[in-house]
Amino acid sequence: MASEAQITQREIVSRNPATGEVLGRFDCATVADVRAAVLNARDAQAEWGVLPARERLKVLRRFQRLLQEGKTEVAQLITRETGKPYVEALLTEVLVVLDTCRFLVESGPAMLRDEAVPHGNLIMKAKVGQVRREPWGVVGVISPWNYPFSIPAGEVLAGLAAGNAVVLKPSEYTALTAVELRGLLARAGLPKNLFRVVLGDGVTGAALVEAPVDKIFFTGSVATGRRVAQAAAARLIPVVLELGGKDAMVVLDDADLDVASSAAVWGAFVNAGQTCLSVERCYVQRRQYEHFLELCLAKTQRLRIGNGMHRATDVGPLIHEGQLRIVEEHVAEARLHGARILTGGHRLPDLGANFYAPTLLANVDHSMQIMRDETFGPALPVMPFEDEEEVVRLANDSEFGLSASVWTGDSARGEKLAARLDAGTVMINDVVSCFGISEAPHGGVKSSGLGRTRGRLGLEEMVRAKYIDSDRLPYTKKVWWYGYGPEFGPQMEGFVDFLFAPSLLRRVRGGLRSFAAFFREGRL
Ligand code: NDP
């Protein structure tokens, strides 16, 4: 458990990874600060949680308007804090969040509505049931730096729409973006304390899991996710875990190679490869392999690397030195074991401390880290395969299962193969963009996580089901209550036959035998 002494007097620093410029400094929230934020949020939630969904969604509509008006400033801030190209900040962050609002406003009320539960069992026919979707109370959101706006905002907005209060612990590297999200929601008229941001590092994140929150939504690495799940299990609170990936791209021999190679290059290098859904390994059917590599090489060499604020930049820097070292290690190990580096494979110090050249690798295999562990950087390892059996085995040979993609001119063939891949999402003839579909659930299998965010299934994670059952015969004692007596057992045998015996004759006989039980005297 984090002690007070451990988390006092520490500060986090937000830096532009392209230039090293310090953008902001913040004191880490203490254990007491985190706890107070959760308790204040709980107070605020009491009124919010009972409002009709339509009322709550008015705030989201105003937020959407403000974000649309401020899109340029918000995207520029994200670019300064993460290094990603401005246009990526605009499309993969701002636009995704605007569309999340659209989805929640349009579909939220219907999805959060009470749901009738018809009863099929004849003996229960006098009852009427419904499932109500109630907010958990206070949900904690812990988010990473790679998509510092779209990831937390998606969860925060769904949580608020469902009637929760939300306390967010953003990554220490992207505190300013979280502060901007808080500002926008405040300006949209969200009641005070319903959305709290606690700034700090991993210790602050741990303090949030230990604070009296009702559910945790964690997005980050497998190692931290495991720690969060263990801490949540000790408190018996549920968690949704969105963790790492080693997403496979499978290019079949009937795919359009020009399109597929463009997808591989974009899918591997978007956000400098720091995307949970990015193409981390690519498999190409043998007869197309060399041609595919040539196309990828030509396209990779045309990428413009630089500061994301420059409008022509395709690929920005990595977030920090630690991330860059992981990429370097994976590439060095692959090279040592015989991989061919077709382009890249080195830092770009002339551009700044955190730049690494987009790297294309051939002659790779599953003994190499670059094909097994999450690289989370601008590396595209490409491996040939002979047939579908082999590629299914290769794609599933991973501890991860976040997403995958299949490339083919034959969508039926693609769907058949998709069904055999162990992944939370499989895209046919596209990569990464599933996160931009607000209706689609997002999440992984195996070490890539538990539960779902986004879409209807993500909204369902923000509520707990309460079943309400109402008996329409309030003046009648139930047939199965005490006062059984010697006849009741045989009568109920008859009733079971009446409901489930295979022959019509036995059902009719059973019905006749059980009939008297429903007028049984002597019930207590
Ligand atoms: P981390 O696991 O390092 O951190 C994630 C968040 O957890 C940060 O806010 C971090 O704070 C916080 N944290 C750190 N330690 C603890 C702790 N003990 N208890 C609670 N919270 C803690 O991941 P990164 O930020 O480096 O993000 C990269 C990873 O996220 C990659 O593995 C990537 O695949 C994954 N990811 C998964 C996605 C998905 O949807 N499946 C989407 C995006 C990323 P701080 O940063 O301040 O240390």
Image (cartoon, rainbow, N blue to C red):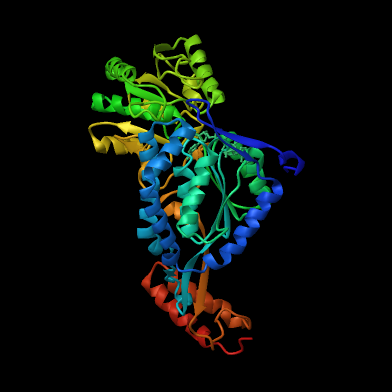
Front in this rendered view, residue 33 or 361: 33
Instruction: Name above or below for residue 154 compared with residue 513.
Output: above
Residue at 47% x, 28% y is: 397
Q: Quadrant of residue 39?
A: bottom right
Can residue 422 be seen here? The reply is no
What is the tally of numbered marks visible in this picture? 0
Q: Quadrant of residue 251?
A: top left
Residue 294 is left or right of residue 365, and the answer is left
Front in this rendered view, residue 435 or 170: 170
Instruction: Name above or below for residue 323 compared with residue 155.
Output: above
Can residue 355 be seen here? The reply is yes
Q: Position of residue 92 (x, y in %)?
A: 38, 39
Residue 51 is left or right of residue 411, and the answer is right
Residue 413 is left or right of residue 348, and the answer is left
Q: Position of residue 172 (x, y in %)?
A: 58, 37
Q: Position of residue 401 (x, y in %)?
A: 46, 36
Front in this rendered view, residue 192 or 399: 192
Residue at 40% x, 37% y is: 89
Residue 298 is left or right of residue 16, and the answer is left
- Viewport quadrant of the C terminus: bottom right
Front in this rendered view, residue 391 or 114: 114
Instruction: Name above or below for residue 367 compared with residue 110.
Output: above
Q: Position of residue 422 (x, y in %)?
A: 43, 36
Instruction: Name above or below for residue 45 compared with residue 172.
Output: below
- Viewport quadrant of the N terminus: top right
Q: Quadrant of ligand 1?
A: top right
Q: Quadrant of residue 343?
A: top left
Residue at 43% x, 66% y is: 55
